[in-house]
Structure formats: C-alpha cells, structure tokens
Image (spheres, rainbow, N blue to C red):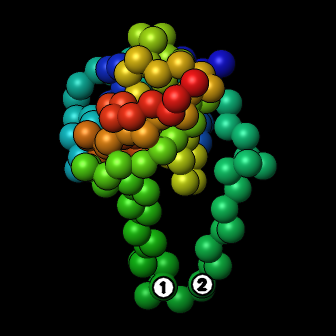
Amino acid sequence: MVEIPDSLQSLFTATVEERENRYYIEIPESEIEHEAAAPGETYRIAVLPHDAETDRQPEPEQSTTDENQAETSPRPEPPVDEGEVRSVEIESVGDQGDGIAKVERGYVVIVPGAEPGDQPTVEIEQVKQNVAFARVVDEPAA
C-alpha cells in the first residue's frame, strides 16, 4: 500500500538520467510554475516503481522537421476542478491517515478521514497539477 503524507506538494513521473556518473531526475517546469517546487530549495522525495503497462500512453509521432520538433504538447489539465462534487472510492490510506482515491488517468485525490473501501461524495477544495485535496460532503449509508 502506498502511503502519501498530507504535506505532498507534487506528484509526477520522471526518468532517472545518468550524466558523468551522477544521477538526475528532471522536475517538470509546470511544478515550478505551480509553486510546488522552487529552484535552490531542498525537498524530500519518494521514488515509487512505475508500472509502464498501466500508465502507458501512445508516444507522439516524431517529426524530422525543425519546426515540429520545437512544438511541445501541453500537459493535460487536472481532471477535477475546485468546488466540484463527485463520488470517489478510497483505495488506500496515507501515513497521516488520509484516504487516497484515484480518478481519471490515475489522478490522486486526498480525502482526510476516509478509509479504504469508503465511497464518499467529496467536494474538491484544492487542485494542483498532480494531486487534489477534498473533503467528504456525504457518506453512503452502510
């Protein structure tokens, strides 16, 4: 079971790269733009195995023209909006006791006080590029 703390600021997929016997993980520019990270600051990170089979997305076709190589596809927007009310299923619990649900494209929604197996209706309170925080507004009758 993956445990995610309340203090989670960012969640993204990256490849470990080797350069001159040193190893690097590139932070996406969007994480800087959304103030999840800042240059020169120190952060605690967690490295989780990546299941390529479940997250596989089609690779964009490569073009040999300079004009097309300069274009980059925009990062997908989070699949939830602040104030949105929706039903979720809690899949696991983080180390702070908060429920963790996944919605479209594996996007993580943190729900304080929820337990694995719960299927509450929640209101999304805060949306970040890779994670949202929600509160329970209605729990189904047992």
Direction top: furthest residue: 96
Identity of the residue drawn at 38% across and 61% down: 77
- In the displayed structure, 104 sits above or below 91; it is below
Amino acid type of the residue tagged 2 in the rendering: Ser
**Quick one: SS at disc 1?**
helix
Q: Are marks 2 and 1 in contact (CB under 8 Å)?
A: yes
Which class describes the residues within 10 Å of circle 2: few (<14), some (14-19), or many (20+)? few
Toward the viewer: 120 or 12? 120
Identity of the residue drawn at 52% across and 29% down: 141
Could you say where residue 74 lies in the image, as x and y percent from the top left?
A: 40, 69
State which quadrant residue 128 falls in.
top left
| Precedes in sequence: disc 2 or disc 1 | 2
Disc 2 target residue:
63
Residue 13 is at least partly visible in this image = no
Disc 1 target residue:
68
Distance, label 2 to label 1, CA atoms, is: 6 Å
Identity of the residue drawn at 53% across and 47% down: 103
Direction right: furthest residue: 53
Could you say where residue 53 lies in the image, as x and y percent from the top left?
A: 78, 49
Instruction: Name the image quarter holding the N terminus.
Output: top right
Residue 80 is at least partly visible in this image = yes
Could you say where residue 142 lies in the image, as x and y percent from the top left?
A: 57, 24
